[in-house]
Amino acid sequence: MVLALAGAAVVASALPSAAESGGGGAAPARPDHAPRRVVSMNLCTDQMAMLLAAPGQLHSVSWMASDPRASVLHDRAGAYVANHGRAEEIFLMRPDLIVAGAFTTRESVSMLRRLGFRVEEFAPPAGFDGIRADLRRMGALLGREARAEALVAELDAGLEAARAGADEARPLAALRYAGAWSSGAGTLAHEILDAAGLRNLGAELGLVGTARLPLERLVMGAPELLVTGRPFSPPSLSEAEVRHPALAPLLSRAGAAAIADARWVCGAPFAAGAVADLAAARRTLTAGDGRGGAAR
Amino acid sequence: MRLPYPWLLAALGLLVAALFCASLLIGPAGLGLADGLAALLAGRGEAETLVMREIRAPRAVLGLMIGATLGLSGAALQGYLRNPLAEPGLLGVTGAASLGAVAAIYTGLSLLIPLALPLMALGGAALAALMLLGLAGARGGALTLILAGVALSALCGALTALALNLSPNPFAATEIMFWMMGSLADRSWLHVQLAAPFMLAGWAALAVAGRGLDALTLGEDAAASLGVRLDRLRLALVLGTAASVGAATAVAGGVGFVGLVAPHLLRRAVGARPARLLPAAALGGAALLLAADIAVRLVAPERDLKLGVLTALVGAPFFLRLVLSTRRGLA
Amino acid sequence: MTLLTLRALSVRLGARDAVRSVTLRVEAGELVGLVGPNGAGKSSLMRGALGLLPAGGESSLAALPARERARAAAWLPQSREIAWPVTVETLVALGRLPRRIPGAPMTDADREAVARAMARMDVARFADRPATELSGGEQARALIARALAQEAPLTLADEPVAGLDPAHQLACMEAFAALAAGGAAAMASLHDLGLAARFCTRLVMLDRGRVVADGPPEAVLTAARLREVYGVESFIAREAGALVIQPLSRSR
């Protein structure tokens, strides 16, 4: 899960124009011109659309939206027709707006464009500013600007609540996902840690974007909190590395927090929930003299 | 002038020892020589000790053992098949072990049981051995064994591709692909404990094959007339390769070309005698793999360059050169 | 002393009966020439006798365990395979494998046997050269030396003189004759009937898998039989006490 988020985030930072080219030309739609039959092809756009759309406006979301391991809103996804991101099935749905991820199902998206559909693409957000911009853009597309502003305000309120006081300690945390991946500066995960009042070992070691954090450097960095992504559906084969014996002493001393991947992947307002969880873990750490708390 | 055989083995042994030490002392944590040694030997500094004893030591030991396995089994297979282009992967054992590992990842077993992945890889290798022996028949010669291995490799490759194709999500597929590239990064003593018994048993089976391989220099008929039991030789070879290469693949994924290159580099130096090539190629394989594993840490430490990718990058041009020289030899 | 006993030996190659119920014995002191046209079953007979091909009937050699058989009989196959560029000396020394304890170094007796065999086949001067770099005839001689170095009571050779120059053909036959004279025995398939007649103490002629004649060369190699079995007209004479045979033209 996180691995792919990682890949997408790396590409996103390398190609900033990809998202803008999708959004730049879209004039803000007025409510009376708002699309009536919207199809979303990507987990992230699924969740934003479910939060923002007016009743009856959203017709279909991707099949991943109903996977509890990937989707925060999985219990709401059942209300929509599930699609598998293929041009043929989406063509038959006759949508007047298609929202899609910037890096998935590329062929299907270009096919749909050739068939004359309006497709809007969203790149994975690289930070909270990106989340705010995505929410506002999606709100404008759906003619739901007021709802978008409300969600942005909700996000900001959540971040404010989690913020560390000036006098509070900022413990060192390390992010580690399957496959030795970690997040450095310029990633949403880094901003989530920062917002929760945690320092990011990856960024302090000079990692930029999503990069590998060798086990040795993790052990030598001696973080006070180890934040792991939870394995995404069947196999995350590198989970074995997370259980490497060399991490055992670190884990017995430091805190460990497993954050559901679903909340990191797309951000959206859920990122505030991840921030709150991590802030709680931080407070347990600083209050309990280092004995770790686990956040879900 | 050729180095006398005992001197050659001693020189190779020294090279392996030096690379083993280098492997212990090189890593992204950037420990100094003195700090590293103090941590390794005296346990000075908690994090340093963890890095040296729990991360680097098992990695170096696995590098040594897997390299030796690939070199030894490569030399044994080249001797048996009387072909310098043979390598352990040819028998399909690597493919079958990979398939077992992929099945462990795919079914989620690798999450439930910590060692499910290497255990299933070993199971795949064992199954491959049985199928090879069944396919090649009681009196089948070297050619039958190659064909059986090729068929088995193709089948395993197809099933692995199927698992990737039907993988429940793209991230699982990515992880399967990364695993199959082969790596020694972050392996622990658990991996050593799991793989070592199979590797040692495999080495024992391959080591006794030397005499028969020497006789095979004269062809299968002449070897049989010299008292070599070809059926037993093949059994030792298949089981030895399956156990040792299966275990190597189970903990490190597929690492190609070492088993091809190591015997070839040393063949002249041992006077081309297959039995003498076995220990030399084992040491040579260990040296090559340790060097490659050091190189991946030096060349691109932050990018986690995969060991199998590096050995293939270096090994494939070597293979091409070998093909060309073989062609010249035939002309 | 009987070194090989075959009783009703039969070999099938695919759908073909290559050897049909052959019964014969080879005694110490004999140099047996196995003659007959292509496809008569000469190679199959020897390979079946050695247990290298599944065979019906009985063979005293095939019945032995592999190690003992290797000490009882040496085998020189027709295909001259040398898989690796080992030195000629190493190649010849492979003949000593059945007599050596696994893992032990060569004894003086082993080294002497290798030296004798190399001298016999005139390859001692190539001792340190890679065998794969020799000419075809030189390789053939090195391989014969390998079989001689085995010093088995019985040596079986499949067309040992093919591809040798006349001098080395004679040297090869002399080596086999010396084996026989020394109390051992040899059996060789031969196409050169002149050499067969000159050196062999006994000839066994095969045709379509059966023994059609078995006895001293002058009894086996008659003009009528050569016409019948090979389909050739031959010149047969005695010259200085030796049989001289020259095929002249094809019959029919």
Image (cartoon, helix red, strand yellow):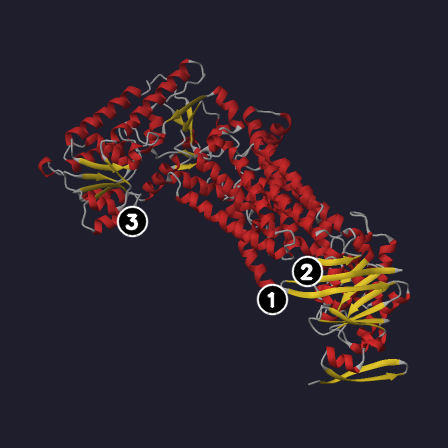
The reply to whether label 3 and label 2 mark residues of one chain is: no
The secondary structure type at the circle numbered 1 is helix
Q: Where is the C terminus of chain B found, in terms of image quarters?
A: bottom right
Per the model, the C-alpha gap separating discs 1 and 3 is: 48 Å
* Residue underneath mark 2: C83
Residue pushed farthest top? A288
Q: Position of residue A121 (x, y in %)?
A: 24, 42
Q: Which quadrant of the structure image shows residue B270?
A: bottom right
* Residue underneath mark 1: B328
* Residue for point 53% across, 37% down: B120
* Residue for point 25% across, 26% down: A155
Q: Which quadrant of the structure image shows residue C130?
A: bottom right
Q: Are marks 1 and 3 in contact (CB under 8 Å)?
A: no
- Chain letter of the residue beneath label 1 in the structure image: B
Q: Position of residue B36 (x, y in %)?
A: 59, 31
* Residue for point 27% across, 22% down: A158
Q: Residues within 10 Å of mark 3 (few under 14, many from 20)?
A: few
Q: Amino acid at mark 2?
A: Ala
* Residue underneath mark 3: A107
- Chain letter of the residue beneath label 2 in the structure image: C
Residue B329 visible to the viewer: yes
Per the model, the C-alpha gap separating discs 3 and 2 is: 54 Å
